Amino acid sequence: MPTPHATHTAMPAPTPAATTPRHVPLAEQTRDGLVESIHYGSLIAVGPDGETLLEAGEPDAAFYPRSSLKPLQAVAMVRAGLKLPGNLLALTAASHSGAAMHLDGAARILEMHGLDKSALENSTDLPYGTAEREEWLRAGGKPTQLAQNCSGKHASMAATCVINGWPVQGYLHPGHPLQVLVKDTITELTGEDAAAISTDGCGTPLFAHSLRGMARAYGRMAAADSAEAEGQVAHAMRTFPEMVAGEGRDVTAIMRTVPGLLAKDGFEGLQLIGLRNGTGVAIKISDGGDRARMPVTVRVLEELGLDGGQLAALASPPVLGGGHPVGVLRAANFLASN
């Protein structure tokens, strides 16, 4: 069977701009009233008609959305004929913790399409979740492709190839028809061409877009009708939030807390949100740190009119001194200068 790049031309990689985005302070950690750490970044919220509802920093700068692209990649696969139970479709869009339900689910996707784990072309890793990783290591587990947090997406990519008669081997090549479809779908949903192309940690082609474009895509997905591929992916994620991340993960918790909210994180400090009314939110913490995502996200959702009280447990983790709270990690006043 010929490899896909024998008949398909690889996508050219645009040259990224060498400028540094004009990020602003988004979060700060205090200790007994003194600010000791500051996280910079950029963010935007757009309405269903694309209007800017609030912004900070430079939301039109290009960045790599990392794992927050997974729901958009899942939309492309559904459009290409992928049909899965809701929990497994949610896993397709997941950065899962590596619990048994996640690994069994990825294996099930492969089995449903006559494949096994040898079809996976993602990188190997230990389970992403802390508890799941510790349990895995205690049992003598080693890094595997199935345990890697993107295995649900990769299992579905291989399955989509089977459905369409495309070569499974080489499905990560940028010129493979699956990846061409993914790129075109992301371009459509974001409303903009990729500013640069790279490779994600798991090996998947990675496309650079703006926070504005990503917010637009999540708003569209969250408001989509269930008859559309976008709506099917969003419904699966909201119905099975434990499959999108895992127990103890903030993405799972926030979807459980706010009915109808669509959420996905991404490595390097990314948080994407979609609301049923078509509002989309995109946040990038510039230092790539994870801890600032939720305080900033909750502040943005409060500004958009959501009840901050129900999100309080996610908003401000305490800063401890001698085992007692002495400060807080909180959102900065990032809207004051905009």
Image (tube, grey):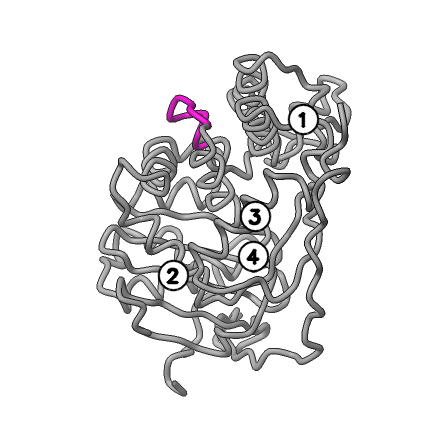
Q: CA distance from mark 2 to mark 3?
A: 17 Å
Report the amino acid beneath label 2.
Answer: Arg
Q: Which residue is mark 3?
A: 67
Residue 328 visible in rendering: no
Quarter in which the N terminus is drawn: top right
Residues at circles 1 and 2 in contact by the CB criterion of under 8 Å: no
Q: Residues within 10 Å of mark 4 (few under 14, many from 20)?
A: many
Which badge, 2 or 3, comes first in the chain's sequence? 3
Residues at circles 4 and 3 in contact by the CB criterion of under 8 Å: yes
Q: CA distance from mark 1 to mark 2?
A: 32 Å
| Horizontal relation, residue 161 to residue 257: left or right | right
Q: Nearer the viewer, residue 165 or 185?
A: 165
Nearest to the eye among marks 1 and 3: give it: 1
Instruction: Specify the quadrant of the image occupied by residue 285.
Output: bottom right
Nearest to the eye among marks 1 and 4: give it: 1
Which dot marks residue 38? none
Instruction: Please identify the residue farthest to the front as the structure is shown.
Output: 7
Q: Which residues are magenta?
A: 82-90
Q: Residues within 10 Å of mark 3 (few under 14, many from 20)?
A: many
Nearest to the eye among marks 2 and 3: give it: 2
Q: Which residue is mark 4?
A: 65
**Residue 252, percent from left and from top:** 42, 40
Q: Which residue is mark 1?
A: 168
Q: CA distance from mark 4 to mark 2?
A: 13 Å
Q: CA distance from mark 1 to mark 3?
A: 22 Å
